[in-house]
Amino acid sequence: MADLFAPEGEHAPVAESIPLAERLRPARLDEVIGQEHLTGDDGAIGRMVAAGRLSSLILWGPPGTGKTTIARLLADAVGLRFAPVSAVFSGVADLKKIFAEAREHARMGMRTLLFVDEIHRFNRAQQDSFLPYVEDGTVVLVGATTENPSFELNAALLSRAQVLILNRLDAAALTRLIARAEELMGRTMPLTANAREALVASADGDGRFLLNQVETLFSIAIDHPLEPGELAKLLHRRMAVYDKDREGHYNLISALHKSLRGSDPQAALYYLARMLVAGEEPLYVLRRLVRFASEDIGLADPQALVQCLAAKDAYDFLGSPEGELAIVQACLYLATAPKSNAAYAAQKAAFRSAKETGSLSPPKNILNAPTRLMKDIGYGKGYAYDHDAEDAFSGDDYWPEEMEPQRFYAPSPRGFEARISERLAHWDKLRAERSGR
C-alpha cells in the first residue's frame, strides 16, 4: 500500500492529480488572499510573525477563507513544528498521543503548533484537556472554527487564546483567486464577463469552493465562452451557509427584526428571503413576526398582529411555495406600520411591579360577593357600575389600598396609539374631577 505521507519523490502524487486548490495553496503569509487585515504588517498575525513569538489563537471564519493555510504558514514563519488534528476524527486517546509527542519535541528544543480543525466539535471536557499543555508552553494552540467561539468554546480556553476573525472572501479576492488559477493553468476560463461574475457570486465567499468550480471548468472541453445560463446548467450553485441551530440562524433573525424595527421594508424582505431560501422553517419565521407585531408595533397598529396570524393561517392552508407570499405580505406590513414598544414596556413594568408587591388584595368594592359571608364583610359594597355613570365612566379607584396608582402603559404619539393617548388623557381628567383629586 502506498505511503500517503512519504517524502517527495517516494510515491509522490503527480502534479496534475493534485486538486487545484491544493496546488494554489499559498507558500507565504503575504500570499494569503482576503485576510490582509490579519496578515499585513499592522495585523495581529503580521505583528506576531515580526516579533517571532506566537500566542495561542482561535481562527474564526466561514469555510474556505484560509484558516488551515494560515495555521500551517504561521508554524513555518516562527519555526514551530506543525501538528494538525481534526476534532471530527480525533478523540482523547489521539490528543494524549499528540501531547506526549509535543513534550518529547519540547525536550529537544522544538516547540509545537497544534492546529485543531473544527475545534468547536470537541466537547467541554476535551477542550479542558488542552489547558495544561497551553499553559506550560508544550504547545501553541491554533484552533479553527466556523462557529461563534463565544457559544462553542470553554471560557477557560477562550481566556488563554486570542480570537481572530477571518473575513468572508469578497468579489475582489475571489477574482484574484481565479486569476491565479488561470496563470497556473496557462489559459483563461471559457466564460463571458457576465458568466465570470456569476461564478464568483456562486462561491458565496468560499475560496475553496470557487477553485473546485474553476477546476471543473478547466477539465471540460468547451468550444465557446459560456453565458450565465449555460454556466448554471453546468455547475451547481453553492447553498448559502446557514445552520438553523447556530449563529447564522440568530444573526439573520436579528437582522430581520432590526430591519423591521427600523421601518426598512427592502432590507427586511432581503433577510426574510435569505432565511427562507436557505431552508429555514417558515413557521419559525412566522412566530418571530407575530412576536414583533406585539413587541414593536402593539396598539400603534392593532392590525399588525391580525396580519401575522392571517399569514400563518394562509401558509397552513397553501403550504410552500404559494403560502410564502403571505409571509412576505406580513413582513412588508410590519416594516411599514407605525412603531411602538409601549405595550412591551408596559408588560415588563407591570410584571416587575407584580413581583414586588406580592399578594396585595384588590379593593373590596370591586370583588364579587357570591356568598352572604362575603357580602357581610364588604365584598362588592359601593361598586360603581360604569355603564350607569355619565359617559359610561365612573372614575373609581381600582388599586389595592396599600398601593398608589401606577402608570405602566404610556402610548406613543404614532398610529392608533395617538387616539388611545387622547382617550386616556380624557379619562384622567374625568377621574380627577370626580374623585376631587
Image: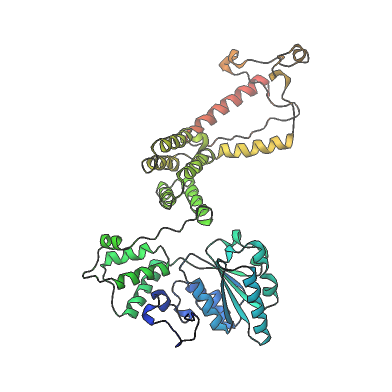
Residue appearing at x 36%, y 71% in the figure: 175
Query: How far across and down, in percent of the image, does residue 247 sit?
Result: 53, 56
Residue that sits furthest to the front in the current view:
1
Query: How far across and down, in percent of the image, does residue 396 sit?
Result: 66, 21
The quarter in which the C terminus is drawn is: top right
How did the renderer colour the structure?
rainbow
Identify whether 82 is placed above or below 412.
below
| In front of the other: 229 or 376 | 229
Query: How far across and down, in percent of the image, does residue 16 sit?
Result: 36, 80
Residue that sits furthest to the left in the current view:
223
| In front of the other: 12 or 57 | 12
Query: How far across and down, in percent of the image, does residue 292 sit?
Result: 51, 42
Residue appearing at x 35%, y 66% in the figure: 200
Would you say 234 lies left or right of 386 here? left
Would you say 195 lies left or right of 263 here? left
| In front of the other: 302 or 237 | 237
Identify whether 7 is placed above or below 287.
below
| In front of the other: 403 or 241 | 241
Would you say 327 lies left or right of 358 here? left
| Among the 4 quarters of the image, the one containing residue 19 | bottom left
Residue appearing at x 43%, y 66% in the figure: 206
Residue appearing at x 32%, y 65% in the figure: 197
Visible residue check, residue 42: no
Visible residue check, residue 217: yes
